[in-house]
Image (spheres, helix red, strand yellow):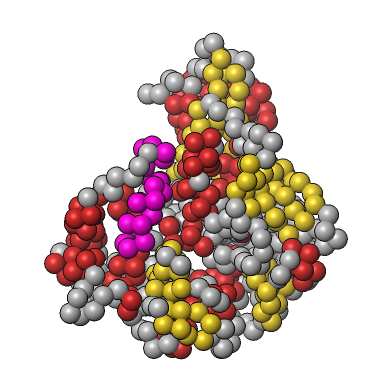
Amino acid sequence: MKGFDYSRAEAVTHAAEQAREGARLIAGGTNLLDLMKLEIERPDALVDINRLELGGIERTEGGLRIGALVSNSACAADERIRRDYPILARAILAGATFQLRNKATTGGNLCQRTRCYYFYNRDQPCNKREPGTGCGAIGGVNRIHAILGASEACIATYPGDMAVALAALDASVEVSGRDGSARMIPVRAFHRLPGDHPERDNVLEAGEVITAVVLPEPVGGTQIYRKVRDRSSYAFALVSVACVIAMEEGRIGRASLAFGGLAHKPWHDPGVEELLVGNEPSDALFDKAADVLLAEAKGQGANDFKIPMTRRVLKGVLREATGRAV
Amino acid sequence: MPLTINGTDHDFTGDPRTTLLDFLRDGCGLTGTKKGCDHGQCGACTVLVNGQRINSCLTLAVMHEGDAVTTIEGFGTPEELHPLQEAFVRHDGFQCGYCTPGQICSAKAMLDEAANGWASFVSDDITAPVSLTRDEIRERMSGNLCRCGAYSNIVDAIAEVVEAGR
């Protein structure tokens, strides 16, 4: 690990001031320290934000405000989240292990980096790790890579589960700027597509600090988080679906869906929801939803299987959520 | 920088790059905690910090001012084993033993998490009280690998302690 100056932030504004080029904020550190050991992340300054007052889950008008330093374990164990936002608790519990979730935080989880093998291997080219070096995954080993929204520069996926549920719930990220001003970023707009700048995972600007995730009022309905992976525990998603469906008089009254494992960000396609709402559930309808979702899907060779797998997982989840379980 | 380990006061003054794991082993001579992968994947380095299990390889010692750390050395003595240690011996929950300190620290925290009603990925109802079935134990211990493959005996040992606690 490369050497760094260690300091502790005493206030959010203090953290923002120190979050300059070359510095990294550290909370749980479960992803950052792993990357620092491999010298993929090489910060010259590490700003410890664990002593900031960003813990606790509070009620807001109708919803909940989850402090950025709330651990993934505490979030999934919160009675209100288990009762009113089960999809969020389920998604968190589908990721990592109890040890990691005890340390990993709400803000840090959003900022975790891809698990692309080429990003992790310093002997390989990677535009995300070192812009301009190329992408080893294109034409290489790409079983876990993106089928939607990829670019010629990068086909990496966002690896997390929590943010997929947050995207389905249409939660927002509360961010504090260097001047102390706050802004809200919808989770659906927080992560970026790679484009020509895959080194940028999300839209945070220099000096911005995540202070909370804000959940809207409970949406009810049937909530399902389904994750398909290579082993049944402690593995990243090949494909995951977060689904909230509310039926009204035999028709789909509300639908909100987000997908993990498919792209550089949790994938949300309003066209899928528009197609479902107002219609009676049927396999034909679910196939059309999959057609919309996957219209632009492109396999890279070893990940071609994700296209039919996504269709099947989506159909299975929609059957279950609309009461047509087989 | 003060912290307590197994109830004893310690002071960390080393390189900020030092992980909690390396401080425990090299700085404090507490070599019960093991280094397996050093990347949070195997669980051999599991310790309790303020009662919660974490991977000590993925956190820096300097981040733990004022914290209370418990390692396997804090769990009972050769004369008076902790019930989990006793159960691991009785059920032969190991072969080489390298993962065992992490398994036992992890299992202790798991019992507390279940008592506090924390659900897991395999819980049918995440709002109901937890019943530690074998499937629940397996899922909750999935952060601790055993290269020797003593899993079935590890589950037996933990299940016995769960049963005794009922």
Question: A50 or A106: nearer the eye?
Answer: A50
Residue B6 part of the magenta-drawn span? no
Vertical placement of residue A98 versus A90, above or below:
below
Quarter of the image containing the C terminus of chain A?
top left
- Residue A247, horizontal then vertical, whole percent: 54, 18
- Residue A119, horizontal then vertical, whole percent: 60, 65
Q: Residue furthest right?
A: A179
- Residue B138, horizontal then vertical, whole percent: 30, 53
Horizontal side of B110 relative to A114 (left or right) equals left
Quarter of the image containing the N terminus of chain A?
bottom right
How many numbered tags mark residues here?
A: 0
Q: Which image quadrant for residue A296?
A: top right
Horizontal side of B165 relative to A55 (left or right) equals left
Horizontal side of A52 relative to B86 (left or right) equals right
Vertical placement of residue A149 versus A175, above or below:
above
First to last magenta residue range: B107-127
Q: Give me the residue at 32% from left, 79% from top.
A: B73
Residue B111 part of the magenta-drawn span? yes
Vertical placement of residue A316 versus A233, above or below:
above
Question: B47 or A309: nearer the eye?
Answer: B47
Q: Give me the residue at 46% from left, 24% from top.
A: A319
Q: Residue furthest left?
A: B90
Q: Which image quadrant for residue B93?
A: bottom left
- Residue B112, horizontal then vertical, whole percent: 36, 57
Determine if residue A134 is in view: no
Q: Give me the residue at 37% from left, 39% from top.
A: B128
Determine if residue A46 is in view: yes
Q: Give me the residue at 50% from left, 28% from top.
A: A222
